[in-house]
Image (spheres, rainbow, N blue to C red):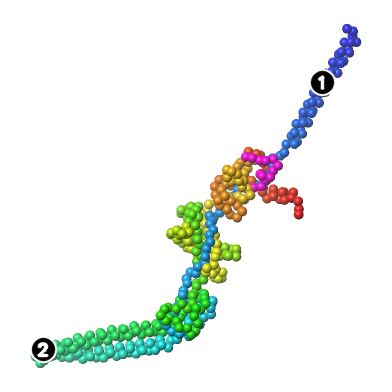
């Protein structure tokens, strides 16, 4: 082997080593580029809109139908028989207790009063006469008693004087009894005469007159003339199913102060009655036919917005001071296992938390347990991201309002 051949082989091997080194370097560069591209293609954690749990005071509530009732209803009736002479009120107006509403012909009753007064006067005269007779009988009896000591009168005459005195005393007492009877008859006659003026037994609003002038009333029966309803305040009777009352009491607690129950009314036109009422009582028995209990509340009605017989809906609220967390309904995920929400933990990972949907306030579910202040509850985004999330997924929490605004910006305008 010549020197030229050895040199040529050495140069060829060196070139091969250089080529191999370049290939390895190129392969390493390609690997780094591939890793960078892979890192560049990995998406960031999805953004979700969250609210921070803030416990607030949420009263226990219940809703039920009800009817307005008058506190007092008085039926105006004729208490004596006679011809109705005059109606002195305007139908549908407010009347006060003692106002004269009707006038019945008083002629006959005035005559009865005059006759009763005459009888009283006669009875008084009879008493005077009886007392005079008693005085004379007492004098005669006393005289005979003195004469009897000297045998000036017989025992028979003395006994007759004593008997006359006793009889005179009896006549005085009979006359006094007659006077009492005549005075009672006079009082009854005067009372009947007063009944000819039919007055209002209570203050309130009077309805239409049920009879007209010239009608004979009170003949054989007590005639109904009109009806008065006391309108301020008013009662509202609510019908609550017994199981709903049990649930309400269980939620409010056995030691609940029912005087603190706040009652609001929804009128038949859908508006809220501006004044609140107070719960008075509930029936102590359940209606076996309907399985319900009647509750009564009292409401002020100075503006006459509530009328007897009106249909309303009542909202009962009891606040015992406990706190609850409100969760928007759209945050709730419903599966075969039940209702739940996502909660972002301290490691920005999702946790699935069961919720109760039994109690609703507006557009929120009321959670009285299971959540603590400061926890981040996912409301928006967990079901919209391109990459599906599940418990344990890492997310980027943002305030719910900010996420909603950003989503609104990306929506096409109409």
- Relative depth, front residue between 146 and 136: 136
Q: Magenta includes 380?
A: yes
**Residue at position x 49%, y 80% from top?**
211
Crowding at mark 1 (Cα within 10 Å: few <14, some 14-19, many 20+): few
Q: Total of numbered circles in the picture?
A: 2
Q: Is residue 389 magenta?
A: yes
Quarter containing the N terminus: top right
Q: Identify the element where label 2 is drawn.
A: helix
Q: Which residues are magenta?
A: 379-391
Measured from the top left, where is residue 286 in percent x and y? 45, 58
Residue at image position (72%, 50%) is 408
- Which numbered disc covers residue 155? 2
- Residue 152 in view in this figure: yes
Residue drawn where x is 67% and y is 41% of the image: 388
Residue denoted by label 1: 20
User: Is residue 363 found left or right of 10 in the rendered image?
Assistant: left
Image coords of residue 383 (percent x, y): 66, 44
Vertically, is 43 above or below 52? Answer: above
Quarter of the image where one finds residue 152: bottom left
Residue 384 location, quadrant: top right
Q: Which mark is residue 48?
A: none
Q: Earlier in the sequence, mark 1 or mark 2?
A: 1
Q: Using residue 228 as the reference point, say whether residue 272 is left or right of it.
A: right
Q: Is residue 258 visible?
A: no
Q: Does residue 333 sit above or below 138 in this rendering?
A: above
Q: Is residue 52 left or right of residue 290?
A: right
Disc 1 is placed on an element classified as helix
- Depicted 70 relative to depicted 55: above or below: below
């Amino acid at each position: 082997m010549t020197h030229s051949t050895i040199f040529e082989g050495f140069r060829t091997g060196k070139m091969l080593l250089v080529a191999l080194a370049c290939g390895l370097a190129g392969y390493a560069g390609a690997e780094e580029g591939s890793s960078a591209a892979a890192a560049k293609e990995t998406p960031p954690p999805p953004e979700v809109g969250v609210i921070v749990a803030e416990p607030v005071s949420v009263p226990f509530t219940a809703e039920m139908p009800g009817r307005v009732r008058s506190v007092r209803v008085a039926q105006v009736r004729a208490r004596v028989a006679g011809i109705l002479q005059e109606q002195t009120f305007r139908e549908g107006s407010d009347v006060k207790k003692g106002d004269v509403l009707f006038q019945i012909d008083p002629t006959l009753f005035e005559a009865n009063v005059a006759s009763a007064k005459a009888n009283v006067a006669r009875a008084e005269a009879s008493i005077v006469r009886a007392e005079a007779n008693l005085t004379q009988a007492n004098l005669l009896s006393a005289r005979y008693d003195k004469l009897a000591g000297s045998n000036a009168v017989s025992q028979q005459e003395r006994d007759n004087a004593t008997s006359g005195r006793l009889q005179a005393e009896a006549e005085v007492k009979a006359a006094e009894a007659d006077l009492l009877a005549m005075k009672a008859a006079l009082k009854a006659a005067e009372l009947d005469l007063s009944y000819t003026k039919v007055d209002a037994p209570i203050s309130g609003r009077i309805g239409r007159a049920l009879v007209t002038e010239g009608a004979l009333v009170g003949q054989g029966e007590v005639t109904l003339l009109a009806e008065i309803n006391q309108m301020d305040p008013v009662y509202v009777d609510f019908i609550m199913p017994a199981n709903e009352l049990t649930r309400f009491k269980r939620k409010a607690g056995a030691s609940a102060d029912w005087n603190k129950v706040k009652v609001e009314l929804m009128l038949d036109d859908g508006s809220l009655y501006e004044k609140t009422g107070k719960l008075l009582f509930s029936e102590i028995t359940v209606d076996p036919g309907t399985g319900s209990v009647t509750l009564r509340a009292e409401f002020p009605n100075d503006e006459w917005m509530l009328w007897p017989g009106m249909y309303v809906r009542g909202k009962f609220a009891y606040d015992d001071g406990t706190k609850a967390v409100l969760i928007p309904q759209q945050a709730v995920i419903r599966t075969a296992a039940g209702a739940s929400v996502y909660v972002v933990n301290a490691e920005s990972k999702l946790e699935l938390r069961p919720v109760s949907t039994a109690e609703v306030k507006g557009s929120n579910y009321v959670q009285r347990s299971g959540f603590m202040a400061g926890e981040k509850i996912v409301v928006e985004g967990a079901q919209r991201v391109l990459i599906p999330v599940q418990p344990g997924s890492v997310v980027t929490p943002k305030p719910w309002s900010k996420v909603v605004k950003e989503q609104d910006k990306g929506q096409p305008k109409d």
